[in-house]
Amino acid sequence: MKDIIIIGGGIAGLTAGMYAKRAGMDTILFERMFPGGQAATTYSIENYPGFVEPISGPDFSMKLEEHARKFGLEILYDDVNEIIVDGDVKKVVTDGQVYETRTIILATGASPKELGLNKEDLFRGRGVSYCATCDGTFYKDRVTAVVGGGDTALEDAYFLAQYASKVYLIHRRDQFRGLKILQDRVLKHEKIEVLWDTVVESILGEEQVEGIEVRNVKTGQTTRLDLDGFFVAIGIKPNSELAKGKLDMTPDGFIIGDESMNTSVPGVFVAGDVRYKPVWQLVTAASDGAIATLSAQRYIMENFG
Ligand code: NAP
């Protein structure tokens, strides 16, 4: 039986793993895709303490994995299908195996939200994208649009402007939500045109994105914009399917955890973007991961001796 099973290999999970192995806990971490989580799809990280020069998301993620492995963390690249959390011994079920553990740390992160437009799903990968840093280079000298007004949309627009001939930044209000430093970069960039008070009505094209129809919510005027790449950056939704019906959650699916990362089920802890909290940042996710492991350690001492 394991001491801790961590589900999710973003910064929260990898930090939890690092702390656990350093403390001598028998621990494994499950990751379904690649280490680093959302950080791995970030162009440049410039607000993580200690990294004075900006570091790319993929490089940062590799460092995280390397750091966790240095302490001997075992990372299994496998999908977890179910967690069984009633009883003192918890179970983590993958396709081929059932793992027993004293504690579970859920660090499954969050994924980009969708707009819910016609053809949004159909054209995913054919002009519709949720990751500018992954797909942006395909749009060299092409026209693109980004929807959203938060940090992600501002960063994506700025990133795309390096390659694209033009970037429309479409926001439903007349004020951005994102950081001032990011706003300033975007507003003075010659290739970026901000469309305020504007919503996207539909995606146009036969086989792939050829344009979009937008509507100004103040004037009611609709306009067709011809473009090749359509990037959606309207926030995140939690990856909390494993916890449905088992742990307390907010109505939009974030797992509720207290300051010690305890969930509503003793022995099950939560960390990172899947947790309901006011600030979703790399540094807060790392902090969650460390706290979750320390709480799990305390729980094991108190309940298993
Ligand atoms: P966010 O802060 O929730 O912003 C989402 C944006 O999309 C808002 O401007 C919102 O408009 C707009 N939006 C939401 N639903 C929409 C819809 N259906 N149609 C049109 N527009 C819609 O999301 P985020 O930018 O992805 O950031 C998520 C979290 O990660 C935040 O906590 C952010 O600070 C953090 N983050 C930090 C960094 C960094 O520090 N460098 C980088 C990326 C993300 P309204 O403003 O009108 O609500």
Image (cartoon, rainbow, N blue to C red):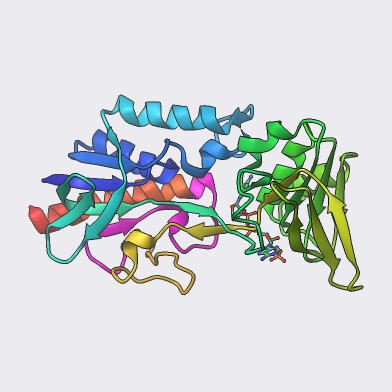
Using the image as rendered, state which of residue 136 and residue 91 is in the foreground: 136
Residue drawn at x 12%, y 61% as measured from the top left: 88
Q: Is residue 294 left or right of residue 203?
A: left
Residue drawn at x 53%, y 40% as measured from the top left: 39
Q: What is the quadrant of residue 30 in the picture?
A: top left
Using the image as rendered, state which of residue 298 and residue 163 is in the foreground: 163
What's drawn in magenta, residue-wise? 262-284
Indicate yes or no whether the magenta region holds residue 264. yes
- Tell me residue 10's x, y (percent): 43, 42
Q: What is the quadrant of residue 201 in the picture?
A: bottom right
- Tell me residue 38's x, y (percent): 52, 44
Q: Could one spot residue 197 in this view of the protein?
A: no
Residue drawn at x 19%, y 56% as measured from the top left: 299
Q: Name the quadrant where ligand 1 sits.
A: bottom right
- Tell me residue 105's x, y (percent): 30, 52
Indicate yes or no whether the magenta region holds residue 74. no
- Tell me residue 49's x, y (percent): 55, 36
In the image, residue 167 above or below residue 246? above
Q: Could one spot residue 22 in this view of the protein?
A: yes
